[in-house]
Image (cartoon, grey):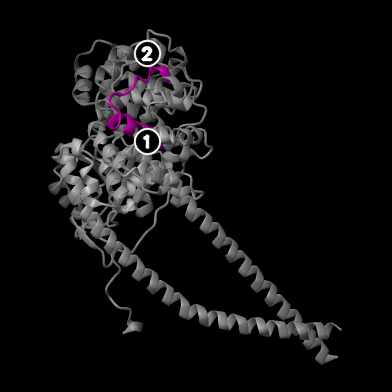
Amino acid sequence: MGNNFFTDAGEVINMLFLIYSISIVVVYTSMSAISIYYFFYYRRRNIEINYDTLLSAGDAAPSVSVIASAYNESATILSCVRALLNLRYSNYDVIVVNDGSTDDTLEKLKKEFQLRKQSYIVNYKIKTKDVRGVYRSVNPIYRKLMVVDKENGGKADAMNCGINISYKFYVVCVDVDSILDRDALLRLVKVITEREDGRVIGVGAAVHVANGCKFENGIIINKEFSKVRIWVLK
Amino acid sequence: MLTSVYNSFNVLLLHMIQIAIVFFILLVVAVPCVTLLLSWRRKRGERRRKMLHQKYEEVIFPFLYHGNMNHIRDIRKKLGRVDKEVFIGILNDLSRYFTYKDQNKIRQIAAVYDLESYILKNINWILPSRKIRALKILVNIGCTRKSYPILQKLQRSKDVILRFYAIQNLILYGSFGVEQDFPDYKYSLSLWEQMGYFFLFRYKLKEEPHFSALLYSPNVTVILFGLRMMRLFHQSLDITRNYEGVLMSKDAQVQVELYRLLAMNKESVNDSAVINVGFYPLEDMLSNYARLDYVTTDTMLDIYHRTDNLAIKRHILICVYDYVAGGKADIEYFAAHHEDGTLNEMCRNLIMEKNGK
């Protein structure tokens, strides 16, 4: 009686494991099939894309604000902001939000980009910490740049502050030390403009580790994997 | 009975596990081997293509930049048979940077090897990505009567990308009239398509068409396309003509585009028919509008005088102060001198607010 019970229970458990395994295989196979379909769908839409069409459109292309939060980024801030100002897109501005840095981040920006404090009414549509000042460059080369100095409130607060300041149609939120591909905005906006009704809430992008890549003035020159060996392989 | 079924099932399961293990071992060996083989083949192909690329470029470039195009047939003598994929790749890359005048040279070179027939074969392929790539290339190297029937068919395709490139080809061929055929266009035009057509009109056509005919279209996206193109090509909209449909449109996007177009022609902005701003987040629209390079304090004040809403009036003054070139000085002037009571008072309040008092 006891033996039979254990044998039956074991077989039931076996069966459950089998059903579980089969369902996992079915789920993963269908996921693979869907990815293959979308791979070809993506390839079809993006084969030999000429992004110059968006570049040449000037202000007819959707406007974008790149919002970058900075907290004690003194060491890298200048090259990073330069990289953001060098993106290939015709209708964008860069809003750097200094989130109450305690180092000389703001001073460096002011000196390098010839920033002057401007009177600016901030519409606090989203509640954030107080803005101490809004700076713009007196040099027309940097007309795309706006620096916002605010009380420290964390990354989300800095992003919300940038969104309050921005008057563009779309915002791209990045850390100031993130390195964007030069065509990143073109690629993102392409997806938005492809929709016939134009109703796109958000677009994602792939994030890669930059270790091993070669840079010049904040622009990726060569994409490579890190040469540092994993300790297991040594 | 039940036990014997389970026993046979267990045997089956055991067999399946054995097959899985063998399959796994095979995969472990096969995957790296196939990867290495494919990588070797890819690198060899790349090296070969690079070599051919260089060889073809050495012959094509002198023709394009200094050569006499009457001796175009010499290309065939110099190169003999060519790898058409590589050859097309070079012409396709080059034509991106060539405008209408030089585009003809590309077409002449393509004609030497009858690349159109090769591309037509690709267009007839089942694989959509191959088809689309071929259509894109055809835009750059030019099409003739040979491609006309298939392009006619594809311009009515349900696939937006196929349709888009087929129409581009037909526009260049001359059988799709922008002023005649676009007003009756029944599909939606996405902004991406509109930008694509703009690129074509600007760089690949001898002269751009006049887009005012598009404003009569029943299709809102075609109207938007027309308004955008008119602004980008600096074509003025004569609002004394019969454009009521557009001028009084309640569509938010049409209104914004109309404002931007009319801002080029400041006299038109004064017309009361177009000061109809109730269908779009007004603050955003005014702020964006004020940021346009060609907007002055006067054009903003025209809107100011046409509204009774004090909140809108105040926002207009903020926009002038913050965005319009010289707007800050104008507001200070109005605060000090202007006799209009409301404007004077609002400007003074704004300056006090800005100065933190």
- Which of the 4 image quarters holds residue B204? top left
* Image coordinates for residue B110, horizontal then vertical, percent: 30, 41
Q: Chain of mark 1?
A: B
In-front residue for pair A34/B348: A34
Of discs 2 and 1, which sits in the foreground? Answer: 1
Task: Specify whether A135 is left or right of B149.
Answer: left
The C terminus of chain B: image quadrant: top left
The N terminus of chain B: image quadrant: bottom right
Contact? badges 2 and 1 (CB < 8 Å)? no
Residue under numbered circle 1: B143
Q: Chain of mark 2?
A: B
In terms of secondary structure, where does tag 2 sit? loop
* Image coordinates for residue B198, horizontal then vertical, percent: 34, 31
In terms of secondary structure, where does tag 1 sit? loop
Q: What is the three-letter code of the residue carrying label 2? A: Arg
* Image coordinates for residue A136, horizontal then vertical, percent: 20, 39
Instruction: Say the numbered circle drawn on residue B306.
Output: 2
